[in-house]
Image (spheres, grey):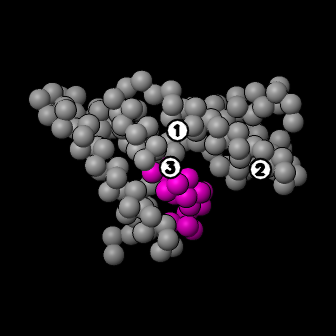
Amino acid sequence: MNEQEKEQIKSIITNFVEAKWYFPYMIDLETHPVFWPIFKWLEKDKKEWVEKIIDECIVEKINSYKTKWGELFRRFFEVNEEDFWNFRDMNCDDNFAQTREFQELWKKIESEIFRYEWILTERMLDQEKWLDKVVWSFYNIVYSFFPRFNLINSD
């Protein structure tokens, strides 16, 4: 695949993120009402190429954050990169959310996310009127990479 095709794929990914608020998985692209004909019948190696582009877009986005909450999320990513990618993979399907592996990794990720949220909110305690917006913005970042982040079992 050439550079022009790569840019077209990145554009589709960007449009998807703007519309759905999270980075797509291959299954999302294959079932998208407009884009599915492009992705559904790709050969396996081309699907892997698209998945690598999605991953590149994710890393680019994480590295582009300029806000405090974005910087904290980047720190979370750098410290927990392997768990990030494993959990991201598990977020591709609702069925994974019911597995023990998902739940265990979720708890580990959640505790790390809470730690960074605390760092963020601790700085904002004297500015209560902005606290909700800051926390909401931080979790928008989290959900953009882990769309099934809230599917923890309370058992």
Which of the labelled discs sits on residue 21, or is there none? Answer: 1
- Residue 124 can be seen in this image: yes
Question: Residue 47 at x, y = what percent?
Answer: 79, 49
Question: Residue 7 at x, y = what percent?
Answer: 75, 27
- Residue 36 can be seen in this image: no
Q: Nearer the viewer, mark 3 or mark 2?
A: 3
**Label 1, label 3: how many angstroms apart (C-alpha)?**
21 Å
Q: Amino acid at mark 2?
A: Glu
- Tell me the residue that label 2 is attached to: 48
Sequence-first disc among 1 and 3: 1
Question: Residue 53 at x, y = what percent?
Answer: 70, 39
Instruction: Say whether residue 97 is left or right of residue 117.
Output: right
Residue at the location (19% across, 32% down)?
123
Residue at the location (33% across, 29% down)?
68
Q: Amino acid at mark 3?
A: Glu
Q: Which residues are magenta?
A: 80-97
- Dot 3 falls on a residue whose secondary structure is helix
Question: Residue 37 at x, y = what percent?
Answer: 83, 44
